[in-house]
């Protein structure tokens, strides 16, 4: 099984890139989590938000395969405590999915087609964060989940 972390567009801020690199390196001690960048929609500034979401959705759907388990990070998704998230990850790792893909959408969220295709919607908070910041938050929580599953001291109870 492969684990992949998909994002739309480049991360613009150096401090976010630095933080993401730290957690990506830490995660690799436990398992391979491949990062996949889906390029921004061309001329997005000239399009309406719904058009951007639809074009991003088309790009995502073109990369997905039939056996993929798609988890979208979305404000309307299910929330977990860190311990619950660790148990969720553990359960998913024991399933027979070809790939588990964690997807963070663009600035406007997801198209209807992506909502329909998603196997799970996950929310990291009731608050709204930028699609760029949530990348770092997700990687930190994923790392935390790995340490919880190994009973390591990173997560203070």
Image (cartoon, rainbow, N blue to C red):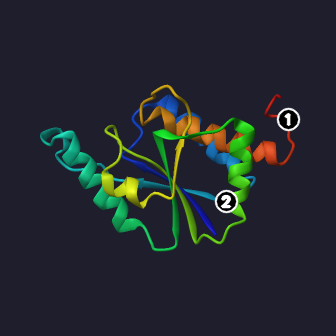
The disc label shown at residue 58, or none: none
The residue that appears at 30% across and 53% down in the rendered structure is: 56
> In the picture provided, is 41 more to the left or to the right than 136?
left
Residue 150 on image: x %, y %: 84, 48
Figure quadrant of the C terminus:
top right
Residue 31 shows in this picture? no
Residue 74 on image: x %, y %: 46, 41
The disc label shown at residue 92, or none: 2
Residue 119 on image: x %, y %: 51, 59
Q: Nearer the viewer, residue 97 or 19?
A: 97
Q: Secondary structure at mark 2?
A: helix
Splitting the image into 4 quarters, where does residue 47 fall?
top left
Q: Residue lying farthest left? A: 46
Q: Nearer the viewer, residue 97 or 143?
A: 97
**In the figure, 17 relative to 120: above or below?**
above
Figure quadrant of the N terminus:
bottom right
The residue that appears at 42% across and 36% down in the rendered structure is: 131
Q: Residues within 10 Å of mark 1 (few under 14, many from 20)?
A: few
**In the figure, 77 relative to 120: above or below?**
above
């Amino acid at each position: 099984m492969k684990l992949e972390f998909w994002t739309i567009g480049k991360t613009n801020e150096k401090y976010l890139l630095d933080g993401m690199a730290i957690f990506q390196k830490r995660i690799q001690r436990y398992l391979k989590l491949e990062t996949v960048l889906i390029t921004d929609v061309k001329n997005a500034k000239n399009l309406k938000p719904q058009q951007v979401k639809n074009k991003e959705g088309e790009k995502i759907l073109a990369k997905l395969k039939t056996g993929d388990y798609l988890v979208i990070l979305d404000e309307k998704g299910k929330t977990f405590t860190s311990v619950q998230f660790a148990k969720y990850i553990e359960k998913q790792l024991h399933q027979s999915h070809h790939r588990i893909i964690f997807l963070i959408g663009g600035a406007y969220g997801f198209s209807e087609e992506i909502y329909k295709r998603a196997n799970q919607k996950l929310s990291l908070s009731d608050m709204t964060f930028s699609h760029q910041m949530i990348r770092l938050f997700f990687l930190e929580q994923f790392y935390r989940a790995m340490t919880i599953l190994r009973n390591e001291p990173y997560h203070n109870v």
